[in-house]
Image (spheres, helix red, strand yellow):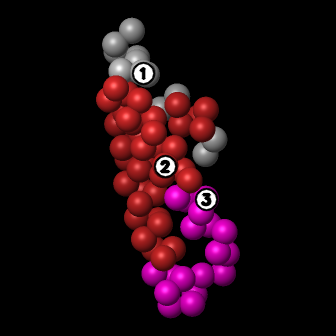
Amino acid sequence: MKANQLGELSVVELNAKLIDNLDSLQNLRFQKALQQLEDGTQIPIVKKEIAQIKTILREYDLGIRKSEGDA
């Protein structure tokens, strides 16, 4: 998902997406450990998306971004 698409999501949706990505990352790491991972480039992609989501959530916490209800 693109960063600008992530910015359009609500805080609840971002938290759900974060949980999904963390689970996905854990599964990818297990697959890598068991040498079942075919595409090793998925791990950095998921890690980057997690970082983007955490950044957007932090911006909401700091008041840099305003949610739809705050405007």
Circle 1 Cα neighbour tier, 10 Å, few/some/many (<14 / 14–19 / ≥20)? few
- Left or right, 7 with respect to 62, comes to right
Residues in magenta, as a range: 30-47
User: Tag 2, which secondary structure?
Assistant: helix
Residue 41 within the segment the image draws in magenta: yes
The residue carrying mark 2 is 51
Q: Are marks 3 and 2 in contact (CB under 8 Å)?
A: no
Q: Earlier in the sequence, mark 2 or mark 1?
A: 2
**In 3D space, how far apart are the residues under numbered discs 1 and 3 (Cα atoms)?**
25 Å
The x and y percentages for residue 68 are 40, 17
The residue carrying mark 1 is 64
Q: Quadrant of the N terminus?
A: top right
Q: Does any portion of residue 39 appear in the rendered image? A: yes
The x and y percentages for residue 67 are 39, 20
Residue 20 within the segment the image draws in magenta: no
* Vertical side of 62 occupied by 27: above or below: below
Q: Residue at x 34, y 26 (%)?
A: 62
The residue carrying mark 3 is 45
Mark 1 or 3, closer to the camera: 1
